[in-house]
Amino acid sequence: MSIRISRFMLGVLLLSILAACGGATATTAPGGSGTTGGATTSGEPIPLGIALAQTGNVALLGQEQVIGAKLAETYFNSKGGINGRPIKLIFQDTAGDEAGAINAFQTLINQDKVVGIVGPTLSQQAFSADPIAEQAKVPVLGPSNTAKGIPQIGDYIARVSAPVAVVAPNALQAALEINPNIKKVAVLYAQNDAFSKSETGTFQNTVTQTLKLELATVQEFQTTDTDFTTQATNVINVNPDLVIISGLAADGGNLVKQLRELGYSGLIVGGNGLNTANIFPVCQKFCDGIIIAQAYSFAQENDVNKAFRDAYKAEQKKEPPQFSGQAFAGVQVFVEALIALDSKTKLDTLSLEQIREQLNTQILAGKYNTPLGEISFDPEGEIIQSKYYVAQIKMDETGTNGTFNFIR
Ligand code: 1QQ
């Protein structure tokens, strides 16, 4: 016991010195090791890499993921970590582009010596950064990469984020339940983003093939655009009953706002890139009514979701969103796979290379009861998940606060 305390205090001392020197680039969540609630953890922490967009425009999405990952770290360490050893999250900011994601992956793999990585935020980044982890044989769980083809990047790449191909069509079904008279549809998408291109493909197929509706116009934009007058005008000119937008949070939110300001009053379906309360300051009162498919519901009934939801609400004073739930699930899968692996072969008898390799096999073999419900993986690393939902944004009178109300 005395050894345990002195080691912990040494760790605290070291962290304060590092913090005082400003020398640490990686950050860990509070409660990453030591005594955090129920159980006690001791011994060398096991480093898990978290590569998410913490700065720039994409941080509108990444911030929610950071919160979910940190809550998972605290929760699983309070339950005894990896058979008594704490899990320690090492955060590297990817920002919003490919170069940032590649950098974060390289640092986590070579410098921080992580056992695996949860990240990156965008599919656009994953297509560049995941091959680096694949080559280094480091397991990756995409927490929000939903484009077609992500698990197929390699043997070490899996995801806890269900693909748009299965999630997105639910939003169109919900739109038709609200307005069964939808005939004419307009689609807009960000042509410089892999996820947006994948998602619009799914939306357009569902509109024309499954629902047999008229696709009246398809408009392209860039995620960096701020002026959507041309696209919005072209949409309004075809007089659609439904507008579907595939983009990211800032561009998507602005597009909604400009469409409404120019007079469009019909239904709007937003894709996964608009799936955050961080669009509220962008489209304000015009966010009202946007329909968005969900791969997570805070109402999911199981113990781990209850614990996650309670912890999230205590900290953030609102219900947890999808991106936080998925990031929590990503950390959880790593933790539970590490526990299973350690129970078979003590981790401290394995080299880092052996841990990474065996951990990858273990991840794909397991079943996990997460805030997303029970999930597992197919042999390629694609998530197997059974429940999907649809939410509709409701803004308050002032146009500053809103909620995601589940309608399906
Ligand atoms: C992807 C996405 C984004 C909207 C995640 C934030 O689904 O890039 O695949």
Image (cartoon, rainbow, N blue to C red):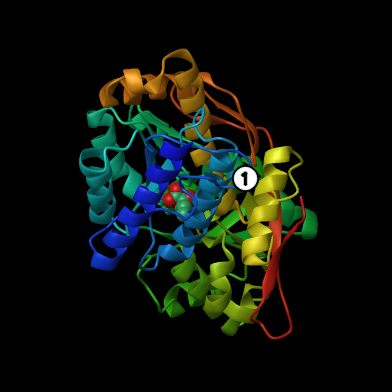
- Residue 407 point in image, percent of width and height: 77, 55
Quarter assignment of residue 289: bottom right
Q: Up-down: is 218 above or below 238?
A: above
Name above or below for residue 7 compared with residue 385.
below
Q: Is residue 389 left or right of residue 67?
A: right
Q: Is residue 234 above or below residue 3?
A: below
Query: Residue 296: image x %, image y %?
Result: 64, 47
Q: Residue at x 60, y 30 (%)?
A: 375
Q: Residue at x 59, y 48 (%)?
A: 325
| Residue at far front of view | 2
- Secondary structure of the residue carrying numbered label 1: loop
Q: Amino acid at mark 1?
A: Ala
The residue sitting at 41% across, 34% down in the picture is 43
Q: Is residue 161 visible?
A: no
Q: Disc 1 marks which residue? A: 295
Q: Is mark 1 within 8 Å of ligand 1?
A: no
